[in-house]
Image: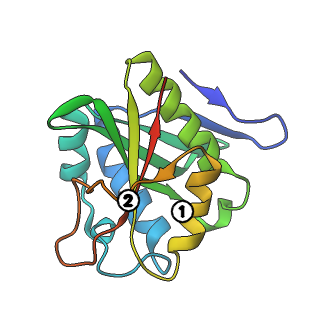
Amino acid sequence: MLETLSETHPYTLRPANLEDADLIASLIRRAWAGTVAPESQGHRMGGAKVLSRLEYGGGAFILEHLGDPVGCVQFVPLEDDVYIWEIMGAAVLKEHRGNHLIDRMLEMVEVAARRARVSELRLAVRQDNTTHKLVSLYERNGFVVDKSLEYSQRNPLTVPPVVLRKVLN
């Protein structure tokens, strides 16, 4: 499933495979450098962690521009409910931001989720100076803040993140 995002912007999305684990980890680290707080786990993301998520039943998409990888997004089922997926590691390199590419990436995750009969998508946003902007981005894509939820991948060294959910019908 290779998806061309628009005729005016030569971006494509493709499903990741196990061999992409190191690439995904590298894209997250590069995209988050200088943008996401240094204590975030993404800065220490390695291929082994990505690979374990992929092998556990998760998936990912790679965003490419003219064939070069410029972004990614991962998703993984909850341990106690495989019909709920957590989205994580959404990243677009700085020079490719501003074209609503994250929206297209989230759409692809949603399409994959619906095909797998997933009932809900969740994601988390760390609480810092970018929280409002990121929450707004995800709300624009149909997610809502749910203060009753905890993020399963939470970094115990930081304040609990804002958790958002999108129920799929």
Name the residue furthest right: 8
Give the SS element for disc 1. Answer: helix
**Left or right of residue 52, residue 116 in this image:** right
Q: Position of residue 147 (x, y in %)?
A: 36, 60
The residue closer to the viewer here, 18 or 85, is 85
Q: Position of residue 59 (x, y in %)?
A: 34, 34
Badge 2: few (under 14), some or many (20 or more) residues near its Cα, within 10 Å? many
Is residue 62 positioned above or below 43 on the image?
Answer: above
Q: Which secondary structure lies at badge 2?
A: helix
Under mark 2, the amino acid is Ser
Disc assigned to residue 135: 1
Q: Residue at x 58, y 47 (%)?
A: 68
Give the residue type that dot 1 points to: Val
According to the picture, the residue beneath numbered tag 2 turns out to be 26
* Residue 84: quadrant of the picture: top left
**Sequence order check, earlier mark of 2 and 1:** 2
Counting every numbered tag in the picture gives: 2
Q: Do callouts 2 and 1 mark residues in contact (Cβ within 8 Å)? A: no
